Amino acid sequence: MADRHDQIRARRILKDIAPAAWEHPADRAALAALRRIPAFDEVLRKLFGLFGEKPVRLAFQANAVRVSEKQFGRIWRRYTEVLETLDSPQAYELYISQTPIVNAGAYGMDKPFIVLNSGSVALLDEEELTYLLGHELGHILSGHVLYRTMLVLLLQLASLGFPVIGLAARAVLMGLLEWSRKAELSSDRAGLLACQNPEAAMGSMLKLAGGGAKEDTDLGEFLKQADEYRQSGDLADAVFKVLNLLGATHPFHVLRVAEMRDWIEAGEYDRILRGEYRRRTADETPYAEDLAAAARAYREGAKDMLDQVADAARRMRDSISEKFNK
């Protein structure tokens, strides 16, 4: 039987992989739409003027411990494996914060860093932790961290009623929230590529959604729940799906796990593991091609929602007609 070291070495190293290989088309579409908001650049400039790199780093890191060979060595070894697997150009700083919620985040302006909640360290097993670290590294490699940091700052300022949150900034905030939800879909794929264990990746999503030890949960039931949620055709439910997301930075976990499974079943995950992926050193896919893929993702998503609403309306009409005809 192979020892643990051999199992780690068996993981495929994705040399020179470009973030575009895992990025979701809806992520790129939402970011393009965000940049078209007239006040976007102005709001970002104001936030940079208010804060700056060092104060932001201190705000996130003041109550956290930097991970190294000497501190949280087990986590450090996992993290170095993730850096190697995704062929990261550098080792970004990793911190652990005493927070019971199972989660993590990637932040920063010029110098990105990752903060891992202690709740994640306590609940996730080795492969699930690898997934989560890969997810956060994916945010950094895809260039998400600046906008994610701006989003966190805007949400905090909005909660305090700070004057910078005027109508222009509110438009930017709503745009950032929409993009942030789509960016999670990209980083979910990066996390899967980091751990190269679909069951562990989807199991992480289960624990992020509800916590619970492995003996208390069932991944099959969670996937069934995801299918039921996506196929729900009730008109009120379709409306609430939209309303529930308006103030959320992340999509619902059941939808994320379903999106991940779709990507696997489409064969994209296996193709990347076979080495069929875009390289950082290669020419970028033409902008028009990326834009077309993004437009398709949005169009298909909108069509799904419209189909749900239309189906619900038909069923409502039939139900009313049936009652009146009795």
Image (spheres, helix red, strand yellow):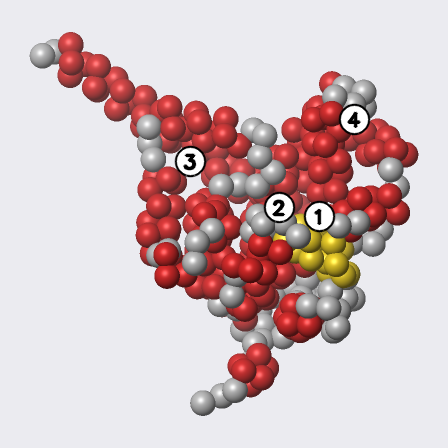
Determine which of the numbered discs, if any, sits on residue 183 in the image: 2
Mark 1 vs 2: CB contact within 8 A: yes
Residue drawn at 53 percent across, 41 percent down: 251
- Check the picture and name the quadrant holding the C terminus: top left
Residue occupied by mark 4: 39
Q: What element carries label 2?
A: helix
**What amino acid is at disc 1?**
His
Determine which of the numbered discs, if any, sits on residue 30 in the image: none
Which of the two labelled residues, at mark 1 and mark 2, occupies the earlier sequence position? 1
**What amino acid is at disc 4?**
Ala
Which of the two labelled residues, at mark 2 and mark 4, occupies the earlier sequence position? 4
**What amino acid is at disc 3?**
Asp
**What amino acid is at disc 2?**
Ala
Residue 32 left/right relative to 54: left
- Residue in the foreground of this view, choosing between 76 and 241: 76
Q: Position of residue 168 (x, y in %)?
A: 76, 22
Residue occupied by mark 1: 144
Q: Give neighbour class at mark 4: few <14, some 14-19, many 20+ (Cα, 10 Å).
A: some
Residue occupied by mark 3: 304
Q: Give neighbour class at mark 2: few <14, some 14-19, many 20+ (Cα, 10 Å).
A: many
Mark 3 vs 1: CB contact within 8 A: no
Looking at the rendering, which quadrant does residue 65 occupy? Answer: bottom right
Q: Where is residue 311 in the image (x, y as percent from the top left)?
A: 31, 28
**How far apart in space, not on screen, are marks 1 and 2 (Cα)?**
7 Å
